[in-house]
Amino acid sequence: MTATPTATAAPRPVQPVPALQAALAAEHTAVYGYGIAGALLTGGDRAAALADWRTHEQARDTLEAMIVKLGATPVAASPAYALPFAVNDARSARRLAAALEDGVTQAYLGLVAVSDTTLRTFGALAMQPPAQRAAAWRGSTIAFPGMPGS
């Protein structure tokens, strides 16, 4: 008996606006989260959190402009976000910073699947800095940053 190959449907192409909106939502979350983390950090960690917060604000503004240019309305920031765990000291604030960066990395990974080459390149390049920041906050790298389960 031989196995009969089964036809698989081609995956649906990822649409640019929803992928950009997901990246923007992750940036909104990071801006909010760094406000929490930064309040619990001191010294060099606080300076790094402030720099990362500003970086995410700039990325947020860039994504909003890109979405408007495509004729859509950028997703608004929420007034507050649920944190993935209790953040009440410097150690948990560093864990939060790593988790925020992982979320941003994963969101930009979604842009790599769009058909537009310019946006694909943008997503591939944009996911590298947050993956590096996550590694810095975590103190170690992970095998496939941005991939679920990594």
Image (tube, grey):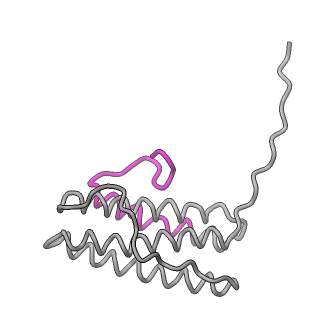
Q: Is residue 78 left or right of residue 47?
A: right
Q: Is residue 118 left or right of residue 90?
A: right
Residue at horizontal 39 percent and vertical 49 percent from the top: 142
Q: Nearer the viewer, residue 149 or 123?
A: 149
Q: Is residue 134 left or right of residue 21?
A: left
Q: Nearer the viewer, residue 146 or 64?
A: 64
Q: Position of residue 95 (x, y in %)?
A: 28, 57
Q: Quadrant of residue 40?
A: bottom left
Q: Is residue 148 magenta?
A: yes
Residue at horizontal 71 percent and vertical 70 percent from the top: 116
Q: Quadrant of residue 124?
A: bottom right
Q: Position of residue 28 (x, y in %)?
A: 45, 74
Q: Nearer the viewer, residue 114 or 90?
A: 90
Q: Position of residue 141 (x, y in %)?
A: 35, 51
> Is residue 51 placed above or below 6 in the rendered structure?
below
Q: Which residues are magenta?
A: 123-150
Q: Position of residue 101 (x, y in %)?
A: 39, 63
Q: Is residue 42 magenta?
A: no
Tell me the quadrant of the picture where the N terminus can be found. top right
